[in-house]
Image (tube, rainbow, N blue to C red):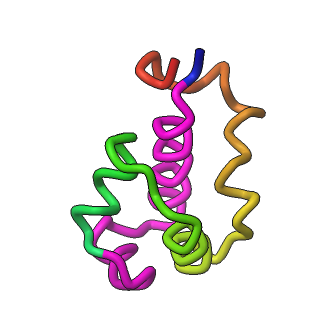
Amino acid sequence: MTNLRRLLGYRIRSLRKSAGLSQELLGELAHLHNTYIGAIERGERNPSLKSIEQIAKALNVKVGDLFKFMDHEASLPAECE
């Protein structure tokens, strides 16, 4: 069974890196602490819907885009499984 938190975190990290943002800058843009961003990316935290919305806005993507990891499962790291 896949770990949804890890999949979401992996997707956020991928989008953040594609945008050329550090965790610190994403945290500032999303009005969230950078350590919280890191914990979300590692799948350690379960973000609220409000946090997910803030992260999507900061990444300039739709909320649904954060969940488009299902199309890329073959390229996900083993820890997401």
* Residue 7 located within the stretch drawn in magenta: yes
Left or right: residue 54 compared with residue 30: right
Main SS, magenta residues? helix
57 vs 6: above or below: below
Residue found at x 70% / y 65%? 63
Residue found at x 51% / y 54%? 12
63 vs 31: above or below: above
Can you give x and y, in whole percent of width and height, for residue 79 in the image? 41, 21
Q: Nearer the viewer, residue 41 or 17?
A: 41
Left or right: residue 68 compared with residue 66: right
Can you give x and y, in whole percent of width and height, for residue 2 in the image? 58, 22
Can you give x and y, in whole percent of width and height, for residue 42 in the image? 34, 42
66 vs 63: above or below: above
Residue found at x 34% / y 83%? 28
Can you give x and y, in whole percent of width and height, for residue 65 in the image? 72, 57
Count of numbered circles on the image: 0
Q: Which residues are magenta?
A: 3-32
Left or right: residue 62 compared with residue 66: right
